[in-house]
Amino acid sequence: MKHHTLLMPLDMHLHLRDGIMLENIALLSAYSFSGALVMPNLVPPVRSKEELLAYKARISQAVGMEAADEDEFEEIGEFSDNGGFEPYMTLFYQNYDKVFLAEIAEEITAIKLYPAGITTNSEGGVKNFDLNEMRPTLEAMAELNIPLCVHGETDGFVMDREAEFMNIYDALATNFPKLKIIMEHITTKAAVEMLDKHPNLFATITVHHLLMTLDDVAGGMLKPHLFCKPIAKRPQDRDALLQIALNAHPKVMFGSDSAPHPRDKKESCGCAAGIFTAPIALQLLCELFDKHGKLENLQAFVSDNAQSIYSLCPEFKEVILAKRPFKVPEDYKGVVPMYAGETIGWAIEDVN
Ligand code: NCD
Ligand code: ZN
């Protein structure tokens, strides 16, 4: 059987939620990833040092927990008390003063900017991109070496939202050349083209945007579990994403944007945006990179590039994957994953 080993996989865009959901799903990421960049879009969002440290403590508690129901985790292998998972914390962007930023800099890996109302729990985000108003915060971030992660969508027509945001990336990257800017979960050829325009621009890509187009979401029967923001785009967009991911372009990193919602919030007449991929992301990536004969580039895409871009030193973890059929569970504690009930081509064999 063909095997492939990944060292210290990192998920550079993850929604871990809070409360029961956090307790139910955090272990699934902690099992196979060395660390993850944790999104701050809680209700209310993470905006103070107290909130941030308290949230980090709740995450650490959730990943330190023994699996309550061992059967649930049988599918993903033997479960140990997994200490080797680092939650890299983010703060929700608003204009902050430099004193506050200097005080919190050691506790955070990045600050995440959401345009107001553009996605789940982003109501408190940025209303208009007035760079002069944002200048003191962004200059302080550049000085303190705090990267800015951006959900890059306008409120325009849904298929054009990301492309329309390119002007804003251009302006941010030009005006703040020392600020590291990460274009989160890019979905378009336009974003791929933007990446090399500025040395201070980087990007994350999800596994679902490498696999799907809008056809998979809405071309036949509507698939609520494949609905997310930004929505999957055209074949030529997906091809552009595949090109840079499969070749492990040094400015791109894997970020799952795994965004769990309870089943009733997805299978609903107002379906919440978000695809749950955390427990199957590495298996899907192995299958995809293998299919394209690019397995040797997966290590850079799932870890090495992120380590250099963010200057991270994750603890040792080795994930051994095998090319054998794996039936994706129908749900993980009530959360339906991508490809639920379907059989994929790679499985996790062991984690050390
Ligand atoms: C995310 C969520 O549910 O928090 N949803 C999504 O569709 N990706 C928010 C986000 O990253 O846009
Ligand atoms: Zn997200």
Image (cartoon, rainbow, N blue to C red):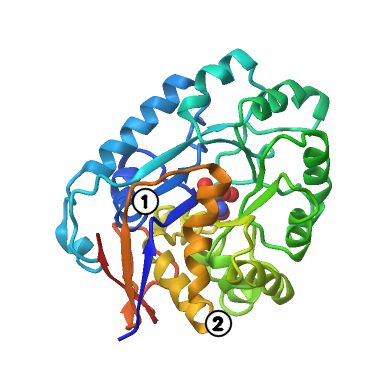
Q: Nearer the viewer, residue 172 or 143?
A: 143
Task: Specify the quadrant that holds the C terminus.
Answer: bottom left
- Secondary-structure class at tag 2: loop
Question: How far across and how far down the image is residue 331, in percent?
Answer: 33, 64
Residue 216 in percent (x, y) is at: 59, 75
Q: Is residue 151 left or right of residue 164?
A: left
Q: Quadrant of the N terminus?
A: bottom left
Residue at figure coordinates x 37%, y 55% from the top left? 33
Could you tell whether 169 is left or right of 247 in the image?
A: right
The circle on residue 109 is none
Which residue bears the numbered disc 1?
Answer: 34
Three-letter residue code for mark 1 = Ser
Q: Nearer the viewer, residue 231 or 298?
A: 298
Q: Is residue 120 visible?
A: no
Examine the image and state in which quarter residue 230 appears: bottom right
Residue type at the position of mark 2? His
Circle 1 packing at 10 Å, graded few (<14), some (14-19), many (20+), is many
> Relative to 336, does residue 153 appear above or below in the rendering?
above
Q: Residue 14: horizontal and vertical position, in percent?
A: 47, 49
Residue nearest the observer in this picture, 68 or 221: 68
What's the mark number on residue 292?
2
